[in-house]
Amino acid sequence: MTTSLEKPYSEIQKTFADTNVFITGATGFIGHVLVEKVLRSCPVNHVYLLMRPKKGKEPYTRLNAMFDGPLFSKLRSEQPNFIKRVTLIFGDCEQPNLGLSPSDEEFVVSNMNIIIHCAATIYLNGSLKRTALINVRSTRDLLLIARRTHHLKSFVYVSTAFANTNQPVSKEIIYDCHMPGETLIDMAESLSAELIDSITKQCLKTWPNTYTFSKCIAENLVKQYGQHLPISIVRPSIVTFTKDEPITGWFTNVNSVPGLCIGIIVGAIRVLLCDKDAPCVIVPADKVANLIITAVWQGSKKSNDGSVIPVFNYVPNNLAPPLTFSQTRTAMVNVIKTHKIYIDKQVWNPSLLCIKSKFFFNIFFYLYHFIPAAMVDIVLWITGHTFRVVPLYSRVYTMMLDMSYFGTGHFKFDDRNLEALISRQSAEDKVLFDIDMTKMNWDTHMLATAYGIQQYIFNQNGNTTAAKKRHRMITTAYYTFTGTLYAFLFYIMYIILNCVFKFT
């Protein structure tokens, strides 16, 4: 069987040859795809993953569940013994020094060649205290470890393209922040969450949320502690479903845009707080993984002379074909209907309103979501069940408010560093680690997304009998309800007109 690890190696593969790679955030969405790609396409000696217990599951239980998933099926087929090249290092980015034991810290210092820091809490308006500990302190502590590492070839910090959207144009530079990283870390370590919450708005100033604020501060720590290191920063925008590798349409994070896509496809979300003409800045997860790997290669070429740390904005605004929220909405709804993709958990007929006015959004959200949800919960209560639909839509409503900044903003990004990076890739690496989005076909990507939701979220292989039956039932209910509603409205209009004519 031919695999991408056969010699001769490409330029990027040579950077990874026989190296030990340390990755944080491996269980996250980007982390999943990155780990798979590194193991499948990079001739590493060993991969070490920082992991903690979660929801009662021990780290190795979580790791096995991760490797048993469909994302790793290709890797399992090509390299059945790949797991022998993976070892867990127990830790927690919320703890000092990433929760590493002294022996594990020294092991990292003595043995790691490549460090990739993906770990982060992505809750947009999460507690500033917790966000600072995970996103900021862990970055500083890992940088301090990297500075002591004996054989470091490259360090990549994964930030976000939205770290500096309070600037007229987000350039590929590290912007200064009004609050030093050490100050925020001291606050998080010494003050209560309640006290920090009370001053969060004053701390944020022109940043829209705690997530983007923390990422800007963390970048400044990279600048402060990363000088003279082979280091680079990768800034992806909104990361969505895989485009090509290792399977199309895969994802694991149901928050943010992927979660909204699920709601749209099953007809559960019909109103979105966004500007239909605003750019929809999404990038496929496999492209992001390729960029991180390419940045490792680029970072390894950097001389230790204290030169400017390279930053790469990964956004579709300039390189990829234009994409607006209106186009995204139309494409998502159309592919479902055109290709007859049915979900056995369908709630209603898929359709979507894009509304940028918060006032009108609130009105339509109540009409289309809260009122029907309340009616369902009443039925559940009568039948002896607990309320669950209104609380669900309350969380969706909060998520939409949090995301409205990204859905209504017309952001501008510079990506000349990214273009130069693509041009420096060898012909072979342009295929192995493709990061060029100039040929993106968004309609095709939306179709893959819909099929991915059907297969990987709802575990359906095609249109099942149950899904077809539910679709017919929902369609009948939809047209019956719509017809009845229009008939009622026409009747009301008839009465009003009749009254007017009688009075005149």
Image (cartoon, helix red, strand yellow):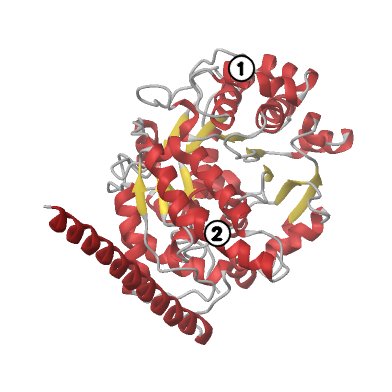
x 60%, y 68%: residue = 70
Q: Earlier in the sequence, mark 2 or mark 1?
A: 1
Q: Which mark is residue 319?
A: none
- Residue 284 visible: no
| Tag 2: amino acid | Ala
Viewer-nearest of labels 2 and 1? 2
**Can you name the residue that lies furthest to the bottom here?**
465
Quadrant of residue 340 within the rendered picture: bottom left
Q: Secondary structure at mark 1?
A: helix
Quadrant of residue 145 within the rendered picture: top right
Residue where numbered disc 2 is placed: 373
43 and 273: which is toward the camera:
273
| Tag 1: amino acid | Gln
Q: Residues within 10 Å of mark 1 (few under 14, many from 20)?
A: few
Q: Position of residue 432 (x, y in %)?
A: 46, 55
Q: Secondary structure at mark 2?
A: helix
Judge left or right: residue 312 versus residue 485. Answer: right
**Residue 210 against residue 60 in the figure, above or below:** above
Q: Position of residue 241 (x, y in %)?
A: 48, 57
Residue where numbered disc 1 is placed: 224
8 and 136: which is toward the camera:
136
Question: How much space separates mark 2 and mark 1, taking CA atoms?
Answer: 50 Å
Judge left or right: residue 87 versus residue 246. Answer: right
